[in-house]
Image (cartoon, helix red, strand yellow):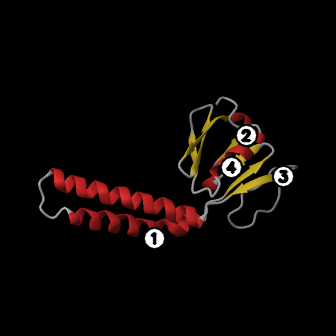
Amino acid sequence: MSDPSPGRPVLAEGETVLAEFAPDKATYWRDQAWMAALGMAGGMAVLWAIGNPHVWTGAVGGLAAVAIRSWYLQSEEMAVRWVLTQDRLLGPNGRKMRIAEIDRLRSLGSAVQVITASGDKHLLKYQADRDATLTQLRRAGAGRGA
């Protein structure tokens, strides 16, 4: 077994890293801006629908909620690392799956969703180049089902 550095998974004997997938800060903030826009529009729509004369406050509330959440979670989200080896995909909090167990791969915005044959779902979030991430996973043999 190799000696892991902080935040890196333990590799099995003979296992080599093919790729490492880390979140991109600019992509994170772009996604948060989209979420804020949707939150603002949603808040205004709800206030308008219930007849509130201060519809603009929905935009302020939606923006504040997403801004606080984004600021609070940024360091946690930026610390997530996924490692692809010739045999496995290793993720945060001890998540690991054999490449042969990965049934499907999907893109969801800037994220790549990994679905195993048993139905477990994992997200590789805030990928700067989602399509390149998908390509690397497929080259390794993941997602033969779709």
Comparing marks 3 and 1, which lies closer to the viewer?
A: 1
Using a 10 Å C-alpha cutoff, classify the residue at mark 1 as few (fewer than 14 neighbours), some (14 to 19) or many (20 or more). few
Counting residues from the start of the chain, the first of labels 2 and 1 encountered is 1
Name the residue tied to disc 2. 138
Residues at marks 2 and 1, CA–CA distance in whole angstroms: 33 Å
Q: Are marks 3 and 1 in contact (CB under 8 Å)?
A: no
Q: Which residue is mark 3?
A: 16
Asked if the residue under mark 1 is in contact with the one under mark 4, i.e. CB atoms within 8 Å, the reply is no
Disc 4 designates what residue? 133
Could you give the CA–CA distance between mark 3 and mark 2, rounded to whole angstroms? 17 Å
Say few, some or many: other residues with alpha carbon within 10 Å of mark 4 (under 14 / 14 to 19 / 20 or more).
some
Local SS, label 1:
helix
Residue at 48% across, 66% down: 73
Q: Quadrant of the N terminus?
A: bottom right
Whole-Å distance between the Cαs marked 3 and 4? 18 Å
Q: Earlier in the sequence, mark 3 or mark 1?
A: 3
Callout 3: helix, strand or loop?
A: loop
Q: Earlier in the sequence, mark 4 or mark 1?
A: 1
Residue 126 placement: quadrant: bottom right
Closer to the eye: label 3 or 2: 2
Dot 2 surroundings within 10 Å: few (below 14), some, or many (20 or more)?
A: some
In this rendering, which labeled residue sits more in front, label 3 or label 4?
Answer: 4
Label 3 vs 4, first from the N-terminus: 3
The residue that label 1 is drawn on is 71
Q: Quadrant of residue 102?
A: top right
Question: How many residues crowd around disc 3 within 10 Å: few (fewer than 14), some, or many (20 or more)?
Answer: some
Which three-letter amino acid code belongs to the residue tagged 4?
Thr
